[in-house]
Image (spheres, helix red, strand yellow):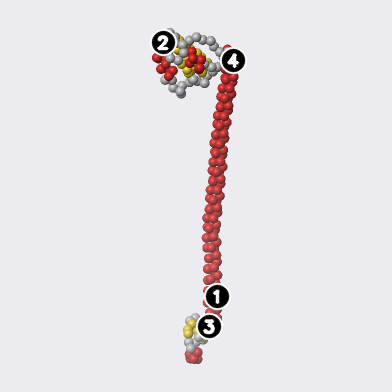
Amino acid sequence: MKVEYDDCQTYHVLPRQLESCTVHRRVVEPALDEEKEARKQLSLLEAEEVFIAREKAEVQAILTQFEAERYRRAKEEAAEKARLAIALEKKLLQEIKKVVRAKEKEKEIATREKDNIRLTNILERIVRGSSGRYITYSLSHSEFVNEHFDETVTCVALGGDATIMLHERGDTMWTSGLHTSLYNKLNGRQKSLPTLEYVSIGSEGRYYV
């Protein structure tokens, strides 16, 4: 049992010792003392609870800021990816349009060239038709000339015993008797060069191609 004396000191004593004490004393019940301690502890816990709640709110605010920043960055990255995708799509469309326009232009040029060739052939047939398709001649190697002469011949050159015929398809026919330099020029002509349009044979080995 606890006993509280007037000198504000509290001592633990046995019940029988109280009889011999002359000092005024007041008995403190254990239940009351424990209640005070409990209330004190409760106050401490409540204060600690308020502190923890405040700390929790501050930490939650920091986490909220991190989440907001993460969301903002993710939104910006998504917008940038979308912008790059749109830019890439536009670039691809432009490249496709360029290719399509180039092919259309090539097709137009090819069609124009075909039309020009067709028109040229028509004009050549008209010219050949107006000039006739037959000739009368008396020359060396007449059988060779007769075999290779037709309406496609555009030029005939005669010189001595030699004859040269140019055809519109680019072929060149000649008989023997050509001067060596002219023969080498015709025989060694590269296929990559333009076709001959005119040839003439002169005297003393002279010629014009």
Instruction: Give the distance between the C-alpha atoms of the residues marked 1 and 3, in whole angstroms.
Output: 14 Å
Dot 1 or dot 3, earlier in sequence: 3
Name the quadrant containing residue 97.
top right
Say whether residue 105 is visible.
no
Image mark for residue 30: 3
Residue at 56%, 41% (x, y): give it: 89
Location of residue 175 in the rendering, given as x and y in whole percent from the top left corner: 45, 15
Instruction: Give the distance between the C-alpha atoms of the residues marked 4 and 2, in whole angstroms.
Output: 34 Å
Dot 3 or dot 4, earlier in sequence: 3
Image mark for residue 205: 2
Residue at 59%, 13% (x, y): give it: 130
Location of residue 207 in the rendering, given as x and y in whole percent from the top left corner: 44, 12
* Amino acid type for the residue under numbered disc 2: Gly
* Amino acid type for the residue under numbered disc 3: Pro
For the residue pair 93 and 155, the one nearer the viewer reads as 155
Name the quadrant containing residue 205.
top left
Q: How many marks?
A: 4
Judging by the rendered image, the residue that carries numbered circle 4 is 129
- Dot 4 alpha-carbon crowd within 10 angstroms: few under 14, some 14 to 19, many 20 or more: few
Judging by the rendered image, the residue that carries numbered circle 1 is 39
* Amino acid type for the residue under numbered disc 4: Gly
Location of residue 125 in the rendering, given as x and y in whole percent from the top left corner: 58, 17
- Dot 2 alpha-carbon crowd within 10 angstroms: few under 14, some 14 to 19, many 20 or more: few
For the residue pair 95 and 195, the one nearer the viewer reads as 195
Report helix, strand or loop for mark 1: helix
Instruction: Give the distance between the C-alpha atoms of the residues marked 2 and 1, in whole angstroms.
Output: 139 Å
Image mark for residue 209: none
* Amino acid type for the residue under numbered disc 1: Arg
